Image: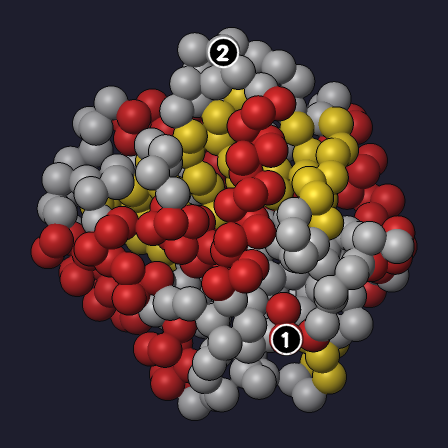
C-alpha cells in the first residue's frame, strides 16, 4: 500500500473521529447546509446539501479528498474522516449555486454505525476503485434528485479531484470539472515518490479521451510537495493536446497542497464556474498567478 497519502495533515487532525464528525456538522449547520446520507449498493455516503437556490443554476458537487488515511507513514488510520475537512471548507463558501458536498466512502460514517464494507484498502490502494466510483456516481444521482438544477459541475480537491475526473469519464451529464491540487495520473505519482502503486484503483490518465471534451479547469499549487507541479504539467499537456479549447490550468503562487484553498475559492468561484459554463476560459499554457488574482 502507498505510504504517502493525499490527505491533508494538519494540527487539526489531533481531533478524534467523533470530534471530526461533530465539527463537520457544526460547520455545515452554521450556513444552513443540511446533512444527508446516500445509500448505495456497497456504502453509506455522507453528504451536506445547501439550501435550495435558483433552479436555473447548476448543481455544483464538491468532492472530499482522501481525508485522514494514515496516522503516520506506517500506520493506516482506522477511520478516514478528515480531521481538517479540506473540501467541506471549500464547499461552504458557495453561497450562490445549487450546491452539495459529498464525502468519500467510510468518511463520517464508521462511528455512527453506517460503515458497512469499510476496509482500509478503500482509503489506501483501492481509493479510486471502480466500485468506489460507481457508488459515488449513484450517490450523485440521489443528490441531483433532491434539488432542481441546470447542469452539473464537479469540484474535487486532492484525491477528490481524481474522483471527479473518473466520475466525468463514467457519466454523460457533467457540464464542467474543476480540480484543486489534484492527481491526474496515480501511476506517475507513485513512481515519482517511489511508493507502492495503487493497483486496485482506476486511473484518470486511462480515460483522457472520454474526459477531454468536457470544459475543465485544473488549479495547481506552486508549492505543492505532495503532487508536484511538474507531474501535473506533463499530464495537462496530454489532456490539452486532445482538446485545447476545453482544458485549462493555472498555477497559483502562495498556495501549497493544503493551505488556503477555501480563501481562494471564496474570492474566485463564481468567475471560475461561470467562465467554464460559458466556455470563455481560453487555453494559454499554464500561467502563474498569485493567490489574490483572478484567473
- Residue in the image at 79% along x and 59% along y: 115
Q: Secondary structure at mark 1?
A: helix
Mark 1, other Cα within 10 Å: few <14 / some 14–19 / many ≥20: some
Residue 121 is tagged as 1
The residue singled out by tag 2 in the image is 55
One can see residue 272 in this view? no
Position of residue 150 measured from the top left corner of the image (x, y, whole percent): 41, 18
Q: Secondary structure at mark 2?
A: loop
Tell me which label, 1 or 2, sits earlier in the chain: 2
Quadrant where the C terminus is found in the figure:
top left
Position of residue 264 measured from the top left corner of the image (x, y, whole percent): 48, 39
Mark 2, other Cα within 10 Å: few <14 / some 14–19 / many ≥20: some
Asked if 171 appears above or below 83 in the picture, the reply is above
Asked if 111 appears above or below 266 in the picture, the reply is below
The image quadrant of residue 71 is bottom right
Asked if 123 appears above or below 284 in the picture, the reply is below
Amino acid at each position: 500500500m502507498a505510504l504517502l497519502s493525499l490527505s491533508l495533515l494538519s494540527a487539526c487532525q489531533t481531533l478524534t473521529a467523533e470530534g471530526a464528525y461533530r465539527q463537520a456538522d457544526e460547520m455545515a449547520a452554521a450556513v444552513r447546509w443540511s446533512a444527508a446520507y446516500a445509500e448505495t449498493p456497497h456504502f453509506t455516503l455522507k453528504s451536506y446539501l445547501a439550501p435550495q437556490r435558483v433552479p436555473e443554476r447548476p448543481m455544483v458537487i464538491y468532492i472530499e479528498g482522501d481525508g485522514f488515511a494514515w496516522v503516520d507513514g506506517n500506520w493506516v488510520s482506522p477511520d478516514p474522516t478528515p480531521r481538517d475537512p479540506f473540501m467541506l471548507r471549500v464547499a461552504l463558501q458557495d453561497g450562490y449555486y445549487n450546491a452539495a458536498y459529498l464525502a468519500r466512502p467510510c468518511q463520517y460514517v464508521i462511528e455512527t454505525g453506517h460503515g458497512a464494507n469499510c476496509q482500509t484498502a478503500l482509503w489506501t490502494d483501492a481509493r479510486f476503485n471502480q466500485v468506489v466510483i460507481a457508488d459515488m456516481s449513484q450517490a450523485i444521482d440521489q443528490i441531483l434528485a433532491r434539488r432542481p438544477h441546470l447542469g452539473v459541475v464537479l469540484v474535487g480537491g486532492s484525491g477528490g479531484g481524481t474522483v471527479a475526473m473518473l466520475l466525468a469519464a463514467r457519466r454523460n451529464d457533467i457540464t464542467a470539472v474543476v480540480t484543486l491540487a489534484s492527481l491526474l495520473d496515480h501511476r506517475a505519482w507513485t513512481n515519482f515518490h517511489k511508493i507502492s502503486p495503487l493497483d486496485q484503483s482506476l486511473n484518470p490518465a486511462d480515460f483522457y479521451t472520454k474526459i477531454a471534451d468536457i470544459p475543465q479547469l485544473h488549479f495547481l499549487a506552486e508549492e505543492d510537495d505532495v503532487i508536484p507541479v511538474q507531474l501535473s504539467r506533463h499530464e495537462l499537456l496530454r489532456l490539452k493536446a486532445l482538446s485545447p479549447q476545453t482544458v485549462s490550468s493555472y498555477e497559483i503562487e502562495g498556495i501549497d497542497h493544503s493551505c488556503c484553498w477555501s480563501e481562494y475559492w471564496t474570492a474566485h468561484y463564481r468567475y471560475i464556474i461561470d467562465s467554464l459554463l460559458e466556455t470563455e476560459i481560453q487555453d494559454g499554457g499554464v500561467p502563474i498567478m498569485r493567490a489574490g488574482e483572478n484567473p
